[in-house]
Amino acid sequence: MADLRPKISIIGCGNVGTRYAYALMMKGGVRQLVLVDLDRKRLEGEVMDLSHGAPYSSPVEIIAGDYSQIENSDLVVITAGKKGKADQSRLDLAKDNVDLYRKIIPEIVKYASSAIFLIVSNPVDILAYAAYKFSSKPKEKVIGSGTVLDTARFRFLLSKHCNVDPRNIHAYILGEHGDSEFAVWSRAMIGGVLFKDYCCICKRNATCQHDEELNKIFTEVRDSAYEIVERKQETSYGIGLALVRITQAIMNDENAILPVSSLVEDYLGINDVYLSLPAVVNKEGVREVLKIELNPREQKQLKKSAEVIKKVIKESGL
């Protein structure tokens, strides 16, 4: 099998893995996709189905492979893991999925040691840290999808509330990808105007219940996954597109700033934990983590996220 470049391998091809593969096909930027999954029969069906769209997508070879066929991958995206239930937090999944990572990370390193690892399985901050520890790879080369999707949800809801294109809204959800995440209201901007200042000039200012609306927006962002899982048993389209955005930043060497989950060191007293902060992402992985200025409330919220994640890391035996 000749390797076409860029080459991306996906480990775990349930709904998230296949949605990502489909979105990647349509967006372009990859020449070879290797899909690996325990359910070989279903995997082969997914590859056949995806491949039949070749006349209408960018040129890409899609392979139903095994670990040996991920060799020379530029990027390995890991979506393998047990699914969360509607009433189950991401952190409740930690122990089982950490045990799974103990098995699969050595296999991935064996065949694709030079690849960047992009971790998607939940709880993503715990599992990104686990992949970093089990792989012994440089911290820059192991990235979690973090709050990239949460941030997209945040921007979308703000755009609806303010009637502004979401591409012109710059705002972040940071910390844990989960219940302790928080909105950085102090740094949110619309068209270069701080959100708090934009509210003063907004035409809806006289009738808008400001605090109530902002709380409602954040609550909807935080609880979106639970709401979607309750209705359709899984979430996959949004994360599939979010993963393509991260992939593009890596493959195109963009130096894009994205709130991925990466190893945090010496920031507000936080050390040796994966959580989401704005990070510069390029072909080397995470070039640097931006230690943005947070207000006192946000600093407290970030520290709480770090404590929550560290507690589960310890309980998971990492």
Image: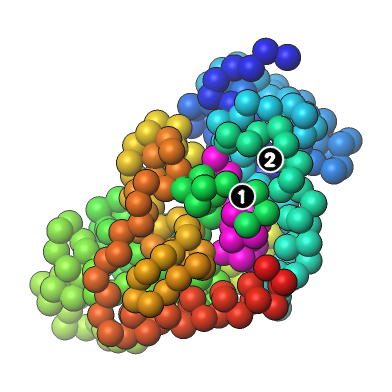
For mark 1, what is the residue? 136
Type of the residue with mark 2 = Val
Q: Quadrant of residue 151?
A: bottom left
| Residue 15: x %, y % from top left | 70, 48
Q: Residue at x 31, y 59 (%)?
A: 290
| Looking at the image, residue 103 lies above or below residue 293 | above
* Residue under label 2: 109
Q: Residue at x 38, y 77 (%)?
A: 269
Q: Are marks 1 and 2 in contact (CB under 8 Å)?
A: yes
**Earlier sequence position, callout 1 versus callout 2:** 2
Let me know if residue 247 appears in the view: yes
Residue 130 lies left or right of residue 49; in this view the side is left
- Residue count near mark 2 (Cα–Cα under 10 Å), binned few <14, some 14–19, many ≥20: many
Q: Quadrant of the N terminus?
A: top right
Q: Which residues are magenta?
A: 116-132
Q: Position of residue 253 (x, y in %)?
A: 37, 34
Residue 162 visible in the shown view: no
Which quarter of the image is occupied by the C terminus? bottom right
Measuring from the top left, give residue 144's x and y in whole percent: 54, 55
Q: Is residue 126 magenta?
A: yes
Local packing at callout 1 (Cα closer than 10 Å; few below 14, some 14-19, many 20+) is few
